Image (cartoon, grey):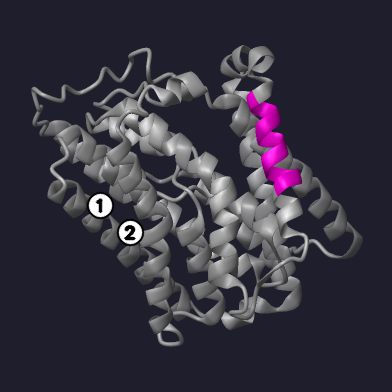
Amino acid sequence: MRAVRWPRWLVIDPFIVAMLALVVVATLLPVRGTAADVAGTIAKIGVAVLFFLHGARIAPRAALAGARHWRLHIVVLLLTFAVFPLLGIAAGLLVPTLLTNDLHLGLLFLCAVPSTVQSSIAFTSMARGNVPAAVFSASFSNLAGIGITPLLAAALLTGTGGVSLTGGAIGAVVLQLLVPFAAGQLSRRWTADWLGRHKRLTGIVDRSSILLVVYTAFSAGVVAGVWQQVSPGRLAGLLLVVTALLATVLGLAYGVARLLRFSREDRVTIVFCGSKKSLATGLPMATVLFSGASLGLLLLPMMLFHQIQLIVCAALARAWSTHPTPDPAHPAPDPAGPDSSIEDSSRVDCDKTPTISP
């Protein structure tokens, strides 16, 4: 009997599978009472550790290698922090036909979070795009997102009902996100080499922190009964909406890049960096910024979008990698070159589907 093989373009992220499994566990065995308080405290510590590791991993010199492509970076930032939010606002027209109010709030928050780092760089390298520019663009998006995402979330979600920003949200962002991130950057002199040698261990810490966030958030929702508001039909509607959102941004990114006459390599970078949303940054941010039993529903659009963006972008990257059209004036960078050393995430074999972390 022949073993069943996944299509090469179908990237099933085991991390997403683990999160969905925890959603089921939280539905059947939610944490309650004192145990919920303890789990929440541990989750906050985990978020701080997570952002410390983010800061310690990002090498400023490597990222700055692609900084000179300022037109490209402006386009990516506008896609990430302007086009996405506008599309999220427009999706309000789908309430209540396809989305509930809480699911629309989750979609709005998804539209406010920064781009991914590792998957944006990996897919850009796989499609033979401008890797140094992708390193800078994705890294800068995450750095800027620490300040921009809370402001966007405040503008988009406050006063819309269901979920509200907590009173100490700004202080929480500074203490739980910005301070650990800055500490990680300052610690690079002593920690960068060690982290480079222990990527498996730090990856486990990353994922464990996020999984705990997911479990505590969905447990709170189950205890409060918010899952009674979501039917299979609503979930199907949400899947359709996030798929349409990704397709729209991909089309806009490619169209704008062609209109502005970017090189082929830069167009690839704009498409992959401008269409992504970071699960690793967004989920912890949500727990810091928001409170309430509906937090679990707030996270659901992000989880679905993450898996869909991996499948679609993997298919795009593979298609583009097999039909390169080099531009002599803008030669493609060497993916293994010295300017693409951030987490070694740009060292991707273009003939293999990369392993993508959140």
**In this rendering, is residue 260 above or below 159?**
above
**Can see residue 309?**
yes
**Which element type, helix, strand or loop, lies under badge 2?**
helix
Q: Is there CB contact under 8 Å for labels 1 and 2?
A: no
Q: Is residue 163 magenta?
A: no
Q: Which residues are magenta?
A: 174-185
Q: Is residue 182 magenta?
A: yes
| Front residue of 121 and 3 | 121
| Front residue of 116 and 37 | 116
Q: Residue at x 53, y 39 (%)?
A: 143
Residue occupied by mark 1: 253
**In this rendering, is residue 223 above or below 82?**
below
The residue lying furthest to the bottom in this view is 96
- Mark 2: amino acid: Leu
- Mark 1: amino acid: Ala
Q: Mark 1 or 2, which is nearer the eye? A: 1
Q: Quadrant of the N terminus?
A: top left
**Which element type, helix, strand or loop, lies under badge 1?**
helix
Residue 123 rendering spot, x and y as whole percentages: 32, 36
Residue occupied by mark 2: 246
Instruction: Kindly indicate the quadrant of the structure image that contains residue 268.
Output: top left
Residue 266 rendering spot, x and y as whole percentages: 22, 36
Q: Would residue 286 appear left or right of 353 to someone viewing this image?
A: right
Graded by Cα atoms within 10 Å as few (under 14), some (14 to 19) or many (20 or more), the crowding at tag 1 reads many
Q: Residue at x 60, y 53 (%)?
A: 283
**Can see residue 2?**
no
Magenta highlight: main SS: helix
